[in-house]
Structure formats: C-alpha cells, structure tokens
Amino acid sequence: MCEHIQACSLIASVLNTEHFKKMQKDSDNDRSMIKRNKILFDRLKYFSSENGYGQYSDGYHEKICIITDEESKRWLKTASSESDLDAINSFEVYSVGNFFSISYFYFCGDKYLIVSGLNSLNLDRDGFEFIEINSGIFTLFSSIDFIRLNDVKNDIGKIYDLFLYFKEEEKNDVRYLDFDDVKDFFKPTFVFKIYEDSGYDDLDLMRMSSYISASQSFDYYSDNFLLFDSIIDLIKMGDKSLNFSFISKAILIKDEPYLLFMELYRMLERVYALPTVKTLKNELSIEMGNSWEILKLIEKNTGWRKKESEGLYSILSLLDEQILIDIFDLLSHCHGSYFKKDAVDNRRKLLNNQSDQSNNEQLHSDWLNCLMEALRDYIYTTRNSYVHYREVLEPHLEREQVLSLCKALLLIINPIYIKVSG
C-alpha cells in the first residue's frame, strides 16, 4: 500500500509529487498493442451491438489483434504528443467541421502531421515528406478515436461478419487481422514528416488546418488573383495575434466564396478598435496589459464597440499609400460600375493637372481621403449585403468579383495587424 506522505519539507513534497505523476503516467500510457487493440475493437463491438449485431448469438470474440511488426510496435510505443514526453492522452486535435481532423505527434525527435478524413492529400510543397501509415500509428490514433469509421450504419454489419463474430472452436485463440483489411473501414488517414525550419514546423493546428484547406484547393485559388500564395503567406508569416479559428472551413468551401470574404473581414473587424485603445492607453498613461487586454476590459465593462464604418476607415488610414492604390486598381478592374470610383478619378486628375505646387499637398490629401472612403464604403456595403437581408444592399457580385475582394482584404490584413496588435 502506498501512503500519501504528509511532510512540510520541500524535498518530501517534490518526491511525493513525482511519485504520483509517475503513477498517473503509467496508468494513462499503456502502449501495448494488446491494450490499444482492445480499446479499438471494444468500440467496434459497441457500434455493432447498437446496430443489432452480436446480441442474440454467442457474442463477440474476445482476443482480436491487428497483425503488426516490431517497427510498427515501436511507433505505437514511442510516438508522443510532445518532443520530450511520452503522453498518449494529450494529443491536441483540431477538426474542420466534418471535413477533416489533424494532430501533431513526435517520433525519434522528428515532428509529424497526421490528417484524417480527406480522400486524398498531397502536400508537395517544400517542407513535408509523405510517410506510409503503419499499423502502430493506426492502432494508436484509432484507439483514441482520432481515426473514425467511414460509415457506421452501412459498414458495421460487414465489420461484425469479418472481425467480431464469435466461434466456439477458437474462443481461446487470438484472432489476427490484416491491417489493410481493417483500415479500409476507416476514414483515409495521411501522415507527413515536417522538416525542421521549413516554415511549417511551428504552425499551430489552426494555421496548419488552413494550409491543408488551401492545398486541397490549390488549382482554384492559384487561378484566381494568385490567392493561393496570398493565403499561404498569411498562414506562414502573418502576425502571431491573427485568429485562424474559422477560416479553414471557408477556404475549403469553394462554391461559396463569400464565406472566405466574410472570414477575412472578421479578421479586420477584430482590430477596428485597437487604434483608439492604443491612443487611450497613451493619453491615460496606462501601463498594465497590452491593447488586446485593455480592449476586452473596456468592452466587458462599458459595452463600447467601435462603429464598423469608422473602424474600417481608421485602419485603412494606417496603410501605406501604395497598398491603397493596389487595392483601388484591383477593384476598379474587376468590379465595374458597382465600385464607385469616379470621385477618386476626378480628384486624381485635378492633382495631376495642378501646376501650382502650393496646392499639391492639399489636393493629394483630398484624393487620398476620397480613395479611402471609396474603399471603405465598398467593402463595408458588400459585408452588409451578406450579413443583412436587404435587397438594396445586394451587389450581385460574381464569383471572380468576390475573390478579388478577398485578395484586397489579404493585402490589408497583415500590414494592419503588424501596426496595431503590438
């Protein structure tokens, strides 16, 4: 019997803590093939029973195991959720709706990406090496319910007939199953080694899921305003405070491009109040916390939020002039009469025709303000047309026009975050 040592000394406290941590770790991290197979096949038996199989026969075979070799067992026993740990229960998982799930794991000092749910996945850009999934990886991740059945209702009868049924004459024998036969009933799963210092090795799971979504749609986004490269640049090099919680799904659903526009807009909407908060922080000589923390406190305690039209203009005013010109040219080319640009063009003509240098500064300021107002009004009106059902706001934009707006927002997002999120 192990008694909990009650002691005040630091040494006793440390020893006691380490003792119980080891007990918990030993309990959680049973990496035997037998234990992991039992968890997997017990789950299959549960689904089988729920769907009426095996209830009125002699039950289920008790000892079922996937055929494996020593190398696969080594993957099962030593794959870990952290580079210096051997913890089975702490694999972080990120799921993109019902489309796919991803996780990271480490093996022999290398970092790996595992993706389940997609029918195919080709990460052929520099930084990844495809690894054939083996029975050890499969058994580990299926036993923790990361790799799931394809179709429980349609497949469970076949699974019962092939794997689970009970035969009296072999009740004491181990039933060995071929790995390929078992995995065919589960969602396709892909494993990639991530090269160190590739630019992908330190992405969190949300950013990595966005990268995978973009990779699934490479042809579509590379053919439309080179959106693919812009999305990848934002994923790999975007400011650390960018939130990628919802954009993966929007990237993947190509037949609804407005979803991507709205998610990119939300990235901008998130920082509308930060310029005001930073000014307030300086005026009041506030030293506690960063601007994000202060913004949360202000909104929580006062309910104040920046007006969207005003907020959008305030962040556009922080951009370099050339970025504004690039966005204006993009929308002018793609959006025709929907994008009201005449006032901007007229002021530009006045500026170009001005011979009196003393007026140039004022004319340039007028033109720049007019340009920012035109961009703000068009982006914000388009946003409203998708948020509110008001036909007067409906721009009737074609897919190419929506994607050009996505490109415009991608030109804005990272420069703005760099300026305001510090």
Image (tube, grey):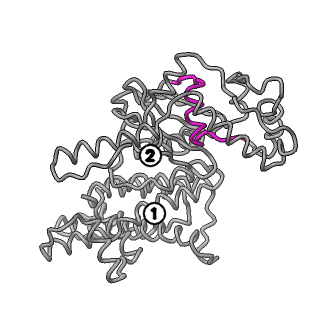
Of marks 1 and 2, the one in the foreground: 2
Q: Residues within 10 Å of mark 2 (few under 14, many from 20)?
A: many
Q: Residue 145, image x and y in percent? A: 60, 43
Q: Quadrant of the N terminus?
A: top left
In front here: 390 or 34? 34
Which residue sits at x=58%, y=68%? 386
Mark 1 vs 2, N-terminal side: 2
Q: Residue 152, image x and y in percent? A: 75, 44
Which amino acid, by three-letter code, is at mark 1? Arg
Which residue sits at x=59%, y=47%? 252
Which residue sits at x=84%, y=48%? 52
Task: Please identify the quarter of the rendering in which residue 141 is found.
Answer: top right
Disc number for residue 221:
none
Residue 219 appears in the rendering:
no
Which residue sits at x=28%, y=59%? 421
Q: Residue furthest bottom?
A: 302
Question: Gap between marks 1 and 2, in whole Å?
Answer: 16 Å
In front here: 205 or 9? 9
Task: Please identify the quarter of the rendering in which residue 68 is found.
Answer: top right
Q: Residue 173, image x and y in percent? A: 73, 22
Disc number for residue 266:
1
Q: Residue furthest left?
A: 285
Q: Quadrant of the C terminus?
A: bottom left
Q: Residue 298, image x and y in percent? A: 30, 77
Secondary structure of the residue carrying tag 2 is helix
Secondary structure of the residue carrying tag 1 is helix
Q: Please state the extent of the stretch shown in magenta in the rendering.
A: 130-150
- Taking the image as shown, residue 281 lies to the left or right of residue 1, namely left
Q: Residue furthest front?
A: 1
Q: Which residue is mark 2?
A: 207
